[in-house]
Every structure is written in structure tokens, then in C-alpha cells.
Image: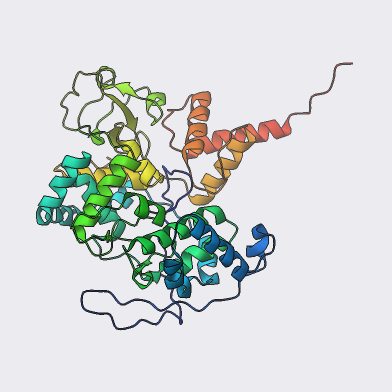
Amino acid sequence: MPILSSGIRTAVVAVIGTLVTSAASAQFAPPPGRPAPAAPRAATAPSSRAAACHNGASFDRFLGELKQQAVAAGVSPRAIADASPYLTYDQGIVNRDRGQRVFGQIFTEFAGRMAAPYRMQNGQQHIRTNAAAFARAEKEYGVPPAVIAAFWGLESDFGANMGNLPVLPSLVSLAYDCRRSERFQNETIAALKIVDRGDLMPDEMIGSWAGELGQTQFLPTHYFTYAVDYDGDGRRNLLRSAPDVIGSTANYIATGLKWRRGEPWLEEVRAPQNFPWDQADLTIRLPRSKLAQLGVTYPDGRALPNDELPASLLLPMGRMGPAFLAYANFAAYTEWNNSLIYSTTAAYLATRIAGAPPMRRPAAAVAQLPFGAIKELQQLLVRAGFDVGKVDGVLGQQSRTAIKAMQIKFGLPADSWPTAELLTRMRGGARAQAASPPETAAR
């Protein structure tokens, strides 16, 4: 599952990069039934900056200490020896990690592409093909087949796109780099534990540039903790065994992400124009009976159930875009990937695979501020005293909370969606504040 920063509503942080290639990654002919293993990448000299958080230690010294940590964590010397040819430094991976590009998409555009009918149909077909494994997973873990299939489709198109890079060099390079060193030291040790347990050989560990493995793109710590052997062959193989993928994904969703058996996750609704928009927020949960009193209905006008099941009104594009009820299980999606546009798309795709109709399209195009304007808005919010996290042109939860507060202050609909009107108001306030004379002490 992707490694992302703060959640996103108006823009998706899509670390969707082209795959890194290396001249040292020549492949060997595979035995029948196995993908070609990649040769270890030749080490490149790490930058001096990368070693700063390791007291100037060279990569070789750092690697020696990391191997000692792995032994202390229970990894056998045999597994470390088998993996050692792959524990090489790759500056290209570090450069890629530091240079992740951020770009924005409207939710309907992203969902239209990623939750397209073909992916819904493929998900339904995989559920039929692997009916026994899906039924077992739902019985044991309480996770519906459509929920598993949606993640499976989004993460790798059911195994078609898992990445083609040796994972161990990526993990150890990011472990040596200072940006997220401790995290990737733990991921490297977890990968060695996977080798030691016999699930994968080092040359089989082919995945994404950031170290995710398998058809639902588990980081090694998640792989080691939650992978299960569902096909009974004695290995937990998330690269080639569909039953193992299904059972392991269900285990992670249920155990790691605390899925609530028998409860919904997302439903499309329609909210009236006089809805109190300040109540539309993932941090606010209201009983469905209360939401019904406020005029929320299903898209076809049917009334919501008159019960106390709590839900949040989710507006991924503000009050002019689609509206959803996000239930407690929606938290599993934001934990899987804390980009709100991704998590909403994944939850929506699951509803489609489960048989829900397509969402209603906005009656008119929903305006979105360009990247530079969003970044300026964040700067103005910081100047107004709000903590928006990183000023990066990406609107996470902190930025959305600040936007809602300023919308309330200016008497605008408080739907957390940044608009040109809000930006104009804030620009005017900033100019007025800058023009006012400084306060002086009374004499």
C-alpha cells in the first residue's frame, strides 16, 4: 500500500511514478511458473548527506549494523547471507523518493478512471473465479469480497502491475537515507524475516520502487505480520497465489485496520442546498435519523433508515459535487491510504463491485483552484494562525479544517472546499492587516 503524507480532499497525492530502470538490473531466464528474478543492482556511492543521520558512517558500516539488528530480531544468518547480494545502495531510489511529484485531480476524474466499469467487472469476475477463498475470508474475517477485490484491483489490477524492481536494494537504500531511515530499517528487517520464514526467496522479491510487495502492495512489515497461507502450500506468497492474496488482504483489513463485521462503509446520498454544511465533515458523525431530518436522502429520493447508525457526510468536491455517507468502516480506507481521494475511490469501487449504481455526476463543472492558488491559500491560512501542516499545495485534513473555519468566519458555505471567493476574501484580509498601523503602548 502506498506510502503517503497527509490526507487529500481536493487533490490526490498520487505517487504514480514511472518505474526506475537500471543497467545493473539484467534479468535471468526464469524457471517455469516463476517471473524472471532481477539481478542485484550494482551499488552506487551514497551521498555524504545520506550518512548524516548515521554519524557519518559509511553505507557498508551502516549495513553491518543493520544486519546485527536483524540477527537480534531473530533473522537467521543463513537468510542474511542469501539476501546480502541484494543489500546494495541505489542513489536513484533515494533521488526518486525525494523527488516525488504531487499533482491534483478532481475526485470525479480520478474515480472515473480508477473505478472504471472494466475494473468493476474484473473485480466481480475474480470474486466468481475465487469464490471459495472469498467465502472463507468473509467467514473468518468478516470482510466482504467486494472490499477485498476493490483494493486488489486498484493496487495492481489483480496482479498485472506489481512493479518490476528488486525490493531489497530499495529498502536498504531508503533505510540509509535520512528522510525516513528508522521506518525503512524496520521494513528491511521485515523483508529479511519474510525470506527467513521461507515465503519468498530474495530474487523473488520484485515490487515497487518504494518497497511494496505483492498483488495488494504490502509493505514488508504488513506482509510479515498479516500474510496467511490460504492455498495450503506452506508459503505465504502474495505475488502468485490468489488465495493467499485474498486471505492476507482480509486479515490485514480486519485485524490491522479494525474492520467492523456486517457494517456498511460508504453509500452515495443527496444533500439539500440548505444543509448546514459545517456539519459535513469526517470528524462529525450524526445518526442517520438526524441526517434524514436535515434532508439527506438516497440519490433517487428514498428516505434514509430512521435509525441511530452514525455516519459522516463526505463531500470530496464540496457541496456542488457528489455526496456520500461514510460509516465507521470508512476509517479502514483512510488507514490503508490516507489520500482522501484514493480512499473514497477505493470505497466507491467496492460499492460498485457489490452492485451499487454509478454515482450521480455534478450538474455543472466544479471549479478547482490551481496548485499555486491552493498553496497561496495555505500560506494565508498559516498567516491567520492555522496549522495546515506542510504548505505544499495539497489540501490535507488540517488545511480543510482551517478552510472550514475561515468559511464560517466569512459567512460562506462551510463545506471545506477551497474557492476563489474564499481566496479573494483572505487576500483582502491579509492586505488590510498589512496596511494597519502597528499597535503602540498607551502613554
Residue 105 point in image, percent of width and height: 39, 51
Image point 43% across, 75% down: which residue? 21
Instruction: Answer left or right for 351 relative to 409.
Output: left
Quarter of the rendering occupied by the C terminus: top right
Q: Residue furthest right?
A: 443
Residue 34 point in image, percent of width and height: 25, 74
Image point 34% across, 57% down: which residue? 217
Image point 47% across, 77% down: which residue? 41
Front in this rendered view, residue 219 or 159: 219
Quarter of the image holding residue 424?
A: top right
Front in this rendered view, residue 30 or 389: 30
Residue 81 point in image, percent of width and height: 46, 71
User: Looking at the picture, does residue 150 appear above or below residue 359?
Assistant: below
**Numbered disc total:** 0
Instruction: Answer left or right for 427 relative to 337.
Output: right
User: Looking at the picture, does residue 340 appear above or below residue 86?
Assistant: above
- Residue 96, can we see it? no
Instruction: Answer left or right for 168 relative to 383.
Output: left
User: Looking at the picture, does residue 292 appear above or below residue 323?
Assistant: above
Front in this rendered view, residue 241 or 312: 241
Residue 70 point in image, percent of width and height: 49, 59
